[in-house]
Amino acid sequence: MGLELTDQRLINTILDQSQNAIAISDLEGNLQYVNPAFVSLWGYHYPEEILGKNASEFTEDKEKTKLILSEILSKSQWTGDLCAKRKDGSTFDIAVTAYCSKDKRGITTHLLANFSDQTKTKELEQYAKDKDIYFSQILDSITDLVFCKDKNFQVTYVNKACADFYGVTKQDLIGIKDVTYNEEEYTKAYHSEDKKVFETGETSYVRKEPNLGPDGVIRILETVKNPIHDTNGNIKEIVGVSRDITETQILEDRLQLITEMTSDYIYTAKIVDGEIIAEWSSKELNTTSGYSIEEIGKLGGWFNVILKEDIPNLEERMAKILKGETGVVEYRIRTKSGKIKWLRDYTRPIRDEAGNLISIIGAAKDITTEKETELKYLLSSQRYQAAMNSALEAIYFLETLKNEEGDIIDFIISDVNKKAEEQLGMKKEELLGKGICQLFPINRENGFFEDYKKVVESKIPIEQEFQVPGNFVAPGYYFHQVIPTNDGIVIQTRDISDRKRMEELLLRTNRLAKVGSFDYDLSHNKITLSQVATEILVQTSKDIDHVDLRFFGTEKFGPILKQKEMHSIETKETFDLECLVCAGSGHEFWIRIIATPKFSETNCIGFYGAIQNIHDEKLVQDSLLDKETLLLAKNRELESLFQVTNKQNERLKEYTYITSHNLRAPIANLISLTAMLKENPSNSEILGLIESSSFQLDQIIRNLNELLNIEKDSKELPKSKIPVKESIDAQILLLKNGANREIEFTNNLPEGMNLLGFQAYFDSIINNILTNAIKYTSADKICKITITYEETKEFLKIAIQDNGPGIDIVRHGHKLFKMNFRLRQDIEGKGMGLFLAKHQIESMKGSIEVSSELGKGSIFFLTFPKELF
């Protein structure tokens, strides 16, 4: 073949293994080499059957083959389709790629061609074309808008509905991003959703997508966009489907408006195997109940929201629905917030073409307010009937009776209460439907009929008082109100005979007491006087114009009354004042005026009050004033003398008690020691004890004498220096000698400590505390008494501790120092010791306290002011 190839075997191997048919020819097209694929594709068995022949013999169009060979030589290559002819004469389409092979000098030496069978490709293309037409016809037959877009948001496909929507051909939309007349903001929103699908690979759903049509009308689309992936899984395009829901949206908006206006919520439910299952509800369901339809489903259904008492009503209604009956039921629900609401539920079953029940549609209305109003009306009606029957006033409902000209000729009784029956002496059945002038002609004579007509015509109520003569069923004084209604009047009549009698009695009483009333109208500067007030002030008229409260005072008291008036308005308080008034006759006299302000909201509109003539009382009061002053002076002198005498009596009582209490021990000691001395006259120890007791007795008497030397007008007790430790030791010795038991005294007070005070009181206080400690300690154990102290710059605090039975402070602490209180009735005493000790120590400006616990003894704390010499 004369081929100049580096490795002929390698080349042959590649050519032989190639799936495409390959041929090599000379410059005239005579074949010099074909590979096995070429032999097989053209239907031959051996290469020798082909080699040496011209390439045109293997094609259907020989002239076209010659032109191709010529073009290869002139342009060095050719690519295209050709119709080939097999050995058996059949033809097939092949794709050809041919080019020139040149040597090192650039001279063309051979022609090379690569062939591929296009039969299957053509078949697939035709199949795809047929399918494309098929699917396109299907897509063109649906009413939804179908479109495809690439990553640049350019349209690659639309169906007929989409083209018709925009009023153009399908081809006009291919390649554009959006129609030019659409709103820019709408287009940006579309592309934003497109981008989201390309980036996430997730379906996009837009419930309401606005789109401006070629006619300038905005349409609402519901659009779904899905990604289309290539064989590698990459998103190649997106396909979108849009549905024009403009009309549906309008209907929804209208339905929404209707439901909002009627406060209804609309719902649908399907019927499956005799069971009603909720499908859809308008948003008012949430407004009414607080639940969404999904939340109600989670609760187990609508029956779990309804009050148990009303479930039977709804179950009965559901049974009728399943029978195909349209109807209404009322029931209560408990909302999500816990509030109870009334619903009126209208339901209508829906049947399919075969007449089977498939669903229901209903509307529920919140009638809570209506029910509450109905309940209020019922309650009001019941109250009205109860009030009518129990009213103390006679009540008449009258309707107008008119002639042909429209003039009122009578009033017909339409209702009366029991009190009216009693007042008229007739039963209700006898009165209803009768005219008042027909029954009681006197109404025309006394003018009542004309008054009633004026109320109807003017719509202005009137109030009147009148007297019923004694020849009627219920004679006496009456007050009635006549109130206009839509079709007549209502008359309320009250028996005021008792009030009239009381008014007459009050008038007589006021005249006797010289008390009258008044009403002051602040806005009109007018004072209206009662009959008695008019008489008191000697006025010719009860109405006084262009005045204020200064009217009641003379020139001297006028400013005071004006000041009182202003203060009452500011504080809303009543004032009470005595002042001089100048009567209509020019005579001045004293009155008492009491005035209370009247308010309308925050504004003072006037005063009401009373005046009393107190002139005579004022004269008597002045005459008694001097005598009262003299008596007061005498009383003060007597009071002072009484206080001094009382103080002396109290101290004499203390003296008596101290005398009887403090002298008892030394006298008893002397008696005992004297008896002992008679038995043993030579006992010097007994003589010493007698001497000591005599000295103590003398000291006690000296201290008591100080009480008797108190001046009658002295305000303080006479003070002396009290040797604290020595005074306590003396009391210890006195009590120890007189006691028939073992006692251990421990006095820890230092010698030389003095207080400035009253010796008799100090000794009495110590004696009382120590005596109680000895007396109350059990006789079968040693009585132990310990005396300690604390001192500051101002006070000396002495503590006397015993080992007695103790005191229940919680039970007895509040009455321990009260007069005549005794802890134990089996121990001799009068309950005066602690009472007197507290009184005496407080007289010395000190205090006494106790700390005790049952079974653990007691501690008495005596605090004295530390006034040392």
Image: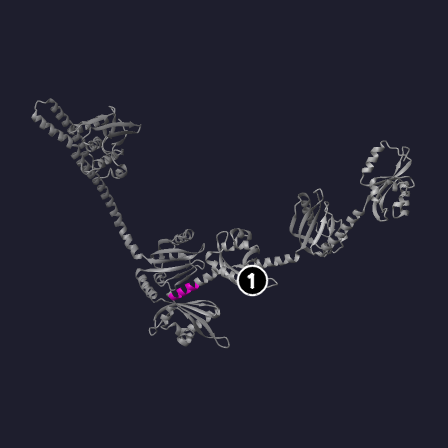
- Quadrant of residue 511 within the rendered picture: bottom left
Q: Is residue 411 left or right of residue 257?
A: left
Q: Nearer the viewer, residue 50 or 775?
A: 50
| Outermost residue to the front | 45
Q: Nearer the viewer, residue 804 or 508?
A: 804
Residue 329 inside the magenta-drawn segment: no
Q: Is residue 675 left or right of residue 527?
A: left
- Report whether residue 715 is seen: no
Q: Considering the image in quadrants, where does the C terminus appear?
A: top left
Instruction: Please name the residue that numbered disc 1 is placed on.
Output: 348
The x and y percentages for residue 333 are 49, 56
Q: Main secondary structure of the magenta part?
A: helix
Q: Is disc 1 surrounded by few (<14), some (14 to 19) or many (20+) residues within 10 Å?
A: some
- Quadrant of residue 9 within the rendered picture: top right
Tag 1's secondary structure?
strand
The x and y percentages for residue 341 are 49, 56
Residue at 7 percent of width and 24 percent of height = 681
762, above or below 574, in the image = above
Highlighted range, magenta? 380-389
99, above or below 452, in the image = above
Disc 1 residue type (three-letter): Arg
Q: Is residue 382 left or right of residue 61?
A: left
Q: How is the image coloured?
A: one colour
Say how many tags the image has. Answer: 1
- Report whether residue 620 is seen: yes
The x and y percentages for residue 776 are 20, 33
The x and y percentages for residue 580 are 35, 55
37, above or below 402, in the image = above
